[in-house]
Amino acid sequence: MSTALHKKLFQEETPLLEEHIDSGLKDFLNSYKSPHTAGNTERDGLYQRYTLDLAHPLPEFDHTLAKAYRASDQSVTTRNLYAMVLANHLPYRTKTIEDLLELQHPNLTSLIASGVCHISLLGEFRQVLLLERPIGPSLSEIRKTQPRLHEHLVIDHILQPLCKALVALSERQIIHGAIHPDRIYLKKELILGECVSAPGGYLQAHLYEPLERMMTDPSSKGVGDEKTDVYAVGILAYELLYGMDRFKTMTREEFIRMALTMGTYNVLVNNLEVSENFQDFFRGILNDDPGERWSVSQLASWVGGKRYNMIAPPTPREAVRPIRFNKEDYYSRRALANAIHQQWRGAIKEIFSLKIDRWCEMSMHRPDLAEKVSRVQRLGGENAKETQNYDALTRLISILDPMGPIRTLNFSMRVEGIGMKLADLIHQGKAKEMREVIDIILNDLPTYWSALTEEQPAPHISRQIWLLQRARNYIKLKSLGFGVERALYDLNPTLPCQSELVKKYHITNLPDLMRTLDALASSIGGQQTFVDRHLTGFIASKLEMSKEVKLDELSNIPELASNPEPIALRLLVKSQQKSGKIPLTGLAAWVGVRIELILNAVHNRVIRKRLLMQLKQTALEGSINELLTILANREMVTRDQEGFSLAISLFAVNKKRIEKLQDDTVVNIYAQSLGGLIATTLGYGILCVAGYFTLSHVMGW
């Protein structure tokens, strides 16, 4: 057989005609009208009674996380209201908002209503607060004409009403976190401004924060406790009586260094003639030890006339002899910890050879502390990896200053503020910086920090440490529903879903998410995948899932086993079930279109056709679970895989045969062999016939 003939028979390819099966789901989606609306089922409820005038902003109430606008109450037209439109990339103090809605106090700005509204100016849904507009100028404006106030005026018109407001908040376990002259208004009565348009302490001036929070980044302070508010009241009184201009000219770090060396009380009060009235007040409040600092009840007693015999806080000089670091002497371990953090890169070279453990034992007489330092110093050094040195340095700083924040190369974070910091960095897209926060969680540093203090941590701190320990396990899992995104929503349960699919709709729970996806199905369904780490992380967090989702039925088909979309669909199934099995025809059709694409991985055309024909009918029932059952059909997978394996084997056998037939030498050998076989067969045949006739003649047959 000629080479040309071989090529014609075996090498020319005939294209396969694949039968196209149209499920009709795309056409259905184009005409679908969802009974649901995108977003919260009760959104825009504020508009039924209140009017937001976006054409009239109120910049005096603005800040970096919220914008203020004029507002009015259609039922009570005499009310003077304003609205705060909040940012949607950080969690809200939802419980505090709910508590404040029930609290009316003459010295507190009244929170009238709260809800999610569509803001036409932004084209997004946002959390909105409706507040009673404070009457009168702010304390900051008053101080421009009266820089110093008499102490009786401060006690009677400032501290007494402030204390009443704090007592009312304390009874409901509400921390204000924003007591500052800019947020206090004074006319006939003092009014303390709102505190829930930003996370606790996020906007507070550093001088109004106690030392352990002053050293912390604004986005990771956490809410704090009632002593945080009392401290701010103490600084407010100090500023009204003596002024803070000298300290405002300092950088935050300059003030921190001075306070760590001398003590905050000594920095502020030394060289001042303080009246007997205020001696106890400042000694009790301006204390750098949170355990010794006054609470709301002690402040209330002092305002009510009780006098204490308070001793001035001592200078923080713990060591008999100093330790020298970076050409400076340090007598306080907290001051040394701060210096190490400020000189981080330089400290890496010096700190592991510095005899801090010996200094703790000999100069501070703290052998227990010396042992902890020694163990940590052995973790790092010249031969250690950079990550090991960084971890060791963070631990060393925590040992030296367990009251302070957890510190890394770029950040200072309170344990209760780690989740907030993570949300802030994800919003800014700072992946490299985010790695530092993740490493803190993975290295279980919050637990380590907590164990350094002898006192039992507050309940909210204990819960946060438990959440961080759980997040540590989830971050290690890379499948959908886990990873960093899962940790984000676990640590910030009030954070709206940050998926680009639904972010502008301000989704905070699963029923609203499912209804929103159904409403969006006709506009984006089919084209958009559900493989979205924010979407799946949000769902898994709300479902409190602890194990990775797996579809064992699809494990035998490599194309499906490695496809993450079936996992995302399984999470949607669980979300629908958790949401009360709401019928979601549009979302089901959207899922059906995605499954239609996935089914291209099925090899058997008969099986694929049968499955595709089931999709539309099942999608119209509105159950995502039934759709996924079509895909995760073990019998189908087994038959398809067995058939495909058999086809591969047959193909391999036939391919070898074809390859042999395409070889001219092999063909010639086959031809010669076949020719010889035919000639031999014919020869034997002729011989048999001739023999028969000869025998017949002889025998006379």
Image: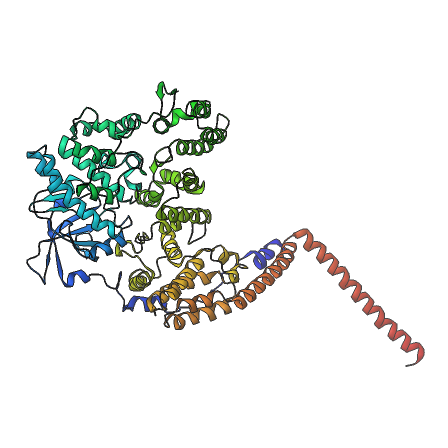
**Residue 501's spot in the image, x, y percent?**
31, 55
**Who is closer to the viewer here, 4 or 284?**
284
The residue at the far top in this view is 327
Residue at 48% in and 30% down:
371
Is residue 126 in sight in this rendering?
Answer: no
- In this image, 695 relative to 527: left or right? right
Image position of 510 with respect to 206: above or below = below
**Who is closer to the viewer here, 638 or 697?**
638
**Residue 526's spot in the image, x, y percent?**
35, 61
- Give the quarter of the figure containing the N terminus: bottom right
Quadrant hosting residue 682: bottom right
**Residue 603's spot in the image, x, y percent?**
51, 63
- Give the quarter of the figure containing the C terminus: bottom right
Is residue 68 in sight in this rendering?
Answer: yes
The residue at the far bottom in this view is 701
**Who is closer to the viewer here, 183 or 125?**
183
Residue at 18% in and 45% down:
163
**Residue 588's spot in the image, x, y percent?**
37, 66
The tally of labels here is 0
- In this image, 648 relative to 374: left or right? right
Image position of 609 with respect to 158: above or below = below
The residue at the far right in this view is 699
Image position of 318 with respect to 195: above or below = above
- In this image, 389 relative to 39: left or right? right
